[in-house]
Amino acid sequence: AQKHRQRLRTALTNFQIFLSHLGGLFNITIQTCNDNVVKCEKNTVNNTNTTTANTTTTTNIDQSSLSSSIHPILIGYKEIDQCWLKELQNRINVRYIEKSLL
């Protein structure tokens, strides 16, 4: 029974991730082989005066890891919580309205 529950949990997680890709809950940037350094901007919120500060993180990528396969970089990734389905529906509705206006 535990194996069956684990398989169902894995299938549900994979399906949620697939829906997240479709709904644009985060953006995917594909790297090229020439990218040695990846820069990601993170927004951090200061709770004392509610100002937003931008910090840049630089990560060096090993060329041996790039030679086997190039993995996409997730930007603006957000953990899937209880509101993920509602957010997905809102994004789909916005995109549908934008396309219908064109």
Image (cartoon, rainbow, N blue to C red):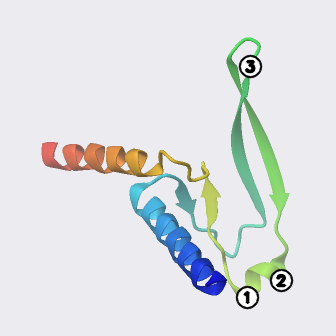
Report helix, strand or loop for mark 3. loop
2 versus 40 height, above or below: below
For the residues labelled 2 and 1, say whether their Cβ atoms are less than 8 Å apart.
Answer: yes
Q: Position of residue 95 (x, y in %)?
A: 28, 48
Q: Which residue is mark 3?
A: 47
Residue type at numbered disc 1: Ser
| In this picture, residue 14 sits left or right of residue 96 | right
The disc at residue 35 is none
Report helix, strand or loop for mark 1. helix
| In this picture, residue 90 sits left or right of residue 5 | left
Q: Reading the chain from its start, which is encountered first: label 3 or label 1? A: 3
Q: Quadrant of residue 98?
A: top left
Q: Position of residue 20 (x, y in %)?
A: 47, 59
Q: Residue at x 40, y 62 (%)?
A: 22
For the residues labelled 3 and 1, say whether their Cβ atoms are less than 8 Å apart.
Answer: no
Q: Position of residue 74 (x, y in %)?
A: 62, 59
Residue type at numbered disc 3: Asn
Question: Closest to the observer: 91 or 100?
Answer: 91
Q: Which residue is mark 1?
A: 68
Q: How far apart, in angstroms, are the residues tagged by discs 2 and 1?
A: 7 Å
The disc at residue 64 is 2
Q: Residues within 10 Å of mark 1 (few under 14, many from 20)?
A: few
Residue type at numbered disc 2: Ser
Callout in the foreground (3, 1):
3
